[in-house]
Image (cartoon, rainbow, N blue to C red):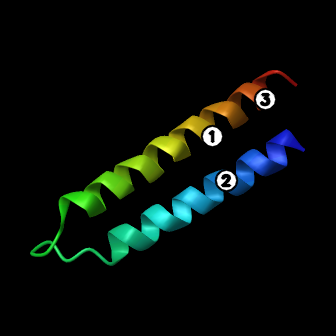
Amino acid sequence: MRLFLSCGIVLHHACHLTEMLASVNPNEFELEQLHLAVNHFLELKRFQALIAEYVDGT
């Protein structure tokens, strides 16, 4: 169950990050957008590490 939830969370953050980066207008990119993108990326990396830990432990 933990693996399933972690995969769902990774997918959620990956979708948000992809959506944000796809809609970026370089001329109007704001610091807040960058902050949100970085937060999604960090959460994505955190849950990828949890999944890797789970897979390595099985």
Q: Nearer the viewer, mark 1 or mark 3?
A: 1
Residue ID at (32%, 78%):
23
Q: Which mark is residue 32?
A: none
Q: Is residue 10 above or below residue 26?
A: above
Residue ID at (37%, 56%):
36
Please tell me how crowded label 3 is: few (under 14), some (14-19), or many (20+) other residues with Cα within 10 Å.
few
CA gap, disc 1 to disc 2? Answer: 7 Å
Q: Amino acid at mark 1?
A: Phe
Q: Is residue 40 above or below residue 28?
A: above
Query: Toward the viewer: 45 or 58?
Result: 45
Q: Which quadrant is home to the C terminus?
A: top right
Q: Amino acid at mark 3?
A: Tyr
CA gap, disc 1 to disc 3? Answer: 10 Å
N-terminal of the two: label 1 or label 3?
Answer: 1
CA gap, disc 3 to disc 2? Answer: 15 Å
Q: Secondary structure at mark 1?
A: helix
Q: Position of residue 10 (x, y in %)?
A: 63, 52
N-terminal of the two: label 1 or label 2?
Answer: 2
Q: Amino acid at mark 2?
A: Ile
Provide the residue designation for mark 2: 9
Query: Toward the viewer: 53 or 43?
Result: 43
Q: Which mark is residue 47?
A: 1
Provide the residue designation for mark 3: 54
Can you tell which quarter of the image residue 34 is in?
bottom left
